[in-house]
Amino acid sequence: MTMKISQKISVKCKKCNKLHDINPEGFSDPEMTSDERSMGYETQYIWEHEFNCDKCNNDLKITIEGYEYPVGILNYQEFNSEGCLIVNEPSLEINNEDYEND
Ligand SMILES: [Zn+2]
């Protein structure tokens, strides 16, 4: 089971208001942690993306968290940003293909 970011994210620099689009491919692989709970494993995925505004050189950071629980279900998601505002929120989805092919 893998969770992925399914659409581009737009953020606005807090300093100069420049808009930045980040494609899902711009994020590296998420950090994953699993915990066993009553209905099986809960997996937390965390993506972090840091870059500098190409207009004012402000430090921008986006953190995306997704929780899969029970397995195959997107239970909860949270987005955080530093130095910028999220204009177009990311969308997360769980790729069920691996599971169906088992
Ligand atoms: Zn800027």
Image: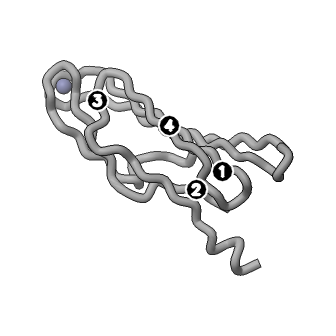
| Cβ atoms under marks 1 and 2 closer than 8 Å | yes
Q: Is residue 92 left or right of residue 95?
A: left
| Label 4 crowd (10 A; few <14 / some 14-19 / many >=20) | few
Task: Judge whether 54 appears above or below 9 on screen.
Answer: above
Distance between the Cα atoms at labels 4 and 2? 14 Å
Q: Residue furthest bottom?
A: 101
x 58%, y 56%: residue: 3
Distance between the Cα atoms at labels 1 and 3? 25 Å
Q: Is residue 80 left or right of residue 42?
A: left
Q: Helix, strand, or loop for circle 3?
A: strand
Image location of residue 42, percent across then percent down? 74, 46
Type of amino acid at the residue the image marks with label 3: Leu
Residue ID for mark 1: 68
Distance between the Cα atoms at labels 4 and 1? 12 Å
Residue ID for mark 2: 3
Type of amino acid at the residue the image marks with label 1: Glu
Distance between the Cα atoms at labels 1 and 2? 8 Å
Q: Helix, strand, or loop for circle 2?
A: strand
Image location of residue 5, percent across then percent down? 46, 54
Residue ID for mark 4: 78
Distance between the Cα atoms at labels 4 and 3? 14 Å
x 39%, y 28%: residue: 81
Label 4 vs label 2, nearer the camera: 4
Task: Judge whether 32 appears above or below 85 on screen.
Answer: below
Question: Which mark, by number, is residue 85?
Answer: 3
| Cβ atoms under marks 4 and 3 closer than 8 Å | no
Image location of residue 2, percent across then percent down? 63, 59
Type of amino acid at the residue the image marks with label 4: Glu
Dividing the picture into quadrants, the one containing residue 72 is bottom right
Quadrant assignment for the C terminus: bottom right
Q: Is residue 83 left or right of residue 71?
A: left
Distance between the Cα atoms at labels 2 and 3? 24 Å
